[in-house]
Structure formats: C-alpha cells, structure tokens
Image (tube, helix red, strand yellow):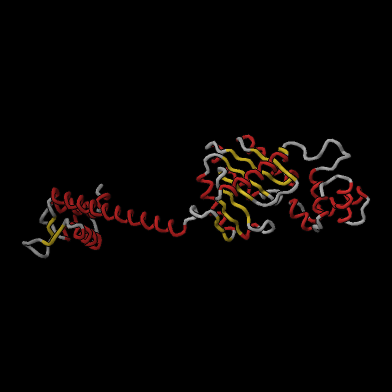
C-alpha cells in the first residue's frame, strides 16, 4: 500500500505493528509477525532511513515509531523533494539535448554530407518522420530483397495513412521479381504509386519539394549521400523526377511495345549505353540485372542489327535512328 511512498511491504507491516504495540522490541516483532531477525532489522533500517522510527529516548535499545500524522508529512515531503530533483534532471537533460542538436544539426546546412550507409539510414528515418505532403524516390538496383520489402512496409503504411503521397521509380528489371511486383500491388492498394524505367541516373529521395537526398556515388550507394536544401537545386531535381516519371510505365503495365518490330525501352537503353562504350557489367549494374542477362540482351541486339561488336551495335542504332546520338 505504501510502496509509492518508498516503503516496502515488510517495512509497512513492521511499522504498523510498532504503532499498535509501542513497547515491542525486535524479539516481539519477530514473534508477532513470524519474521526472521534479519527481515525485522532490514525493515527497521528502511524505516530509519525514511525517518519513521528512531531510538527510544526511554530505552536506547528499543525503537520508537513516529506518529502516523507526522510520518505522512515526512513521506510526502520526501516524495516532493524527489519529484523536484527529477524535474531538475529532466530540465538539464532537455538543455543538453538542445545543445547536442545545435552542435550537430543538419537543418541549417544547405548541403550536408552523410558518410556511410548507417548515417544515411538515420537521416532518412528522421526525414520520414517529418514529411508532410509528398515523398519521391528513385530506387535503382533492380528487384527489392524480401528483407527490404518487409522492413519498408510499416513505414510506407504509416506515411500513406497520414496522407503522404508516395511515388517511386524502379528499374524495369524489377518486373521480373514476383516479390517486388507483389509489393508494388500492395502499395497501390494503399494509395502509393510505382512506375519503372530501363535505367535511373542515381538513387534519390525528395521530401516535400524542399529536401533532396542523393547518393554520392551511383555505383556504390553505401558510400553515403548528400543532403541538398538549396531551393534552386531541389527544384531542378524535382523537375528531373517529373520528367522520368512521365516517361515511366506503371508497374502493372507491360514494359514491352506491342509492335514487335520496335525495340523495348530496356533494349533502347542498352543500345544507348553500348554506344557510349559501357561494358556488359556496367550495363548490368545500371539496369539492375545480372551480367549474364546484359550479355544476352546485347547479343540479341547485335544479331538484330547485324553488328560484329557491342560498340558497333550502338553505332548502327544511332545511324538507323533507333536511339539519339
């Protein structure tokens, strides 16, 4: 009952017994309460620390229990003092937190570097908590892993239920992964929108058209990212996203043209990359496919164009107007 006042159950029953039988000593308390000597002495120590018992003036060998009215005032005063001390500690903690934020804040910088994938994840977690209107994402790298899909769903669901508009652009290669397609359908059911393109320039997140997070190395996104807040820069990146979005296809639609004599967007992008001298491995990385798949696509295109090399296939494609130089 009195545990909220700092008195445990044994100390409480000993205190009550001492009030009922003021003349009792330790032996009497042991007998009446059926407690061991150690338990009684420990209870008396607790009561003494709470200033609820003191040595008797008449017999220093015995203890005197403080009047319960005075005891209540003592216990309440003790609790108020502890509460005031706790409030003081909270105020000091708040001041320390403000100081820490002011020393390491990222909001006042128009350009801030995030070093390493852990820093990027921490920043994005904070950013997602503050997004109010719209979240746009370029997600290169091909199919999403099962672990990534599973971990991202609670966040996506939370944002969409808050009314945040979410648009994400994946690579066309993600269409070949059932788990990614199923995730896209799940997002669409909640109001999210996903489209795909053959290739993406870089990994990027834009929040409310005012903050952009861009990978520092498109070939190694784990290296870190930069946070951009300059209005003109973010506006340009937003325009880039809109341009890519308009040319992208909803993931539920076919990425292949209905006219089999024409090239698919993925094949067109492969030819463009080959004309620039990219290797099969580089093409695979940009399209989010395996090197084997990239080689297979390139070989078919070479056969289709009658080219003897990958670079020559790109040159022929430019000459025939299949891709822009």
Residue 169 image position (x, y, % from top left): 68, 44
Residue occupying the far front of the picture:
232
Residue occupying the far bottom of the picture:
61
- Res. 107 in view: yes
Kindly identify the residue that appears in the image at 92 percent across and 56 percent down: 308
Q: How many marks?
A: 0
In this rendering, position of residue 131 left or right of residue 202? left
Residue occupying the far left of the picture:
58
Kindly identify the residue that appears in the image at 19 percent across and 60 percent down: 48
Image position of 58 with respect to 204: above or below = below
Residue 212 image position (x, y, % from top left): 58, 49
In this rendering, position of residue 181 left or right of residue 11? right
Image position of 312 with respect to 61: above or below = above
In this rendering, position of residue 274 left or right of residue 66? right
Residue 253 image position (x, y, % from top left): 75, 36
- Res. 151 in view: no
Q: Nearer the viewer, residue 61 or 286?
A: 286
Residue 197 image position (x, y, % from top left): 73, 44
Q: Nearer the viewer, residue 228 or 45?
A: 228
In this rendering, position of residue 286 left or right of residue 16? right
Q: Nearer the viewer, residue 92 or 7?
A: 92
Kindly identify the residue that appears in the image at 84 percent across and 43 percent down: 263
């Amino acid at each position: 009952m009195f545990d909220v006042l700092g008195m445990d159950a044994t100390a409480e029953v000993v205190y009550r017994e001492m009030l009922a039988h003021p003349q009792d000593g330790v032996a009497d308390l042991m007998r009446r309460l059926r407690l061991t000597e150690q338990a009684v002495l420990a209870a008396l120590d607790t009561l003494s620390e709470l200033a609820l018992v003191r040595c008797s003036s008449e017999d220093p060998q015995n203890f005197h229990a403080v009047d319960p009215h005075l005891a209540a005032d003592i216990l309440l005063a003790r609790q108020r003092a502890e509460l005031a001390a706790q409030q003081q500690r909270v105020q000091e903690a708040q001041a320390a937190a403000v100081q820490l934020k002011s020393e390491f804040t990222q909001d006042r910088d128009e350009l801030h570097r995030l070093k390493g994938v852990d820093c990027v994840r921490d920043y994005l977690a904070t950013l997602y908590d503050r997004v109010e209107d719209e979240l746009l994402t370029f997600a290169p790298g091909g199919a999403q892993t099962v672990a990534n899909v599973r971990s991202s769903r609670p966040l996506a669901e939370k944002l969409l239920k808050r009314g945040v508009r979410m648009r994400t652009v994946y690579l066309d290669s993600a269409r070949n992964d059932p788990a990614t397609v199923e995730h896209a359908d799940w997002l669409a059911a909640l109001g999210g929108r996903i489209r795909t393109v053959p290739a993406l320039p870089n990994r990027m997140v834009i929040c409310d058209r005012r903050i952009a997070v861009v990978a520092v190395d498109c070939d190694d996104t784990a290296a870190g990212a930069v946070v951009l807040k300059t209005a003109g820069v973010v506006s340009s990146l937003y325009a880039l996203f809109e341009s890519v979005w308009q040319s992208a296809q909803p993931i539920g639609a076919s990425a292949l043209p209905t006219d089999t004599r024409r090239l698919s967007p993925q094949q067109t992008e492969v030819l463009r990359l080959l004309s620039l001298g990219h290797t099969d491995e580089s093409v695979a990385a940009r399209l989010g496919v395996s090197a084997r798949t990239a080689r297979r696509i390139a070989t078919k295109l070479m056969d289709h164009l009658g080219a003897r090399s990958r670079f020559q296939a790109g040159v022929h494609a430019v000459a025939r107007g299949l891709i822009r130089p």
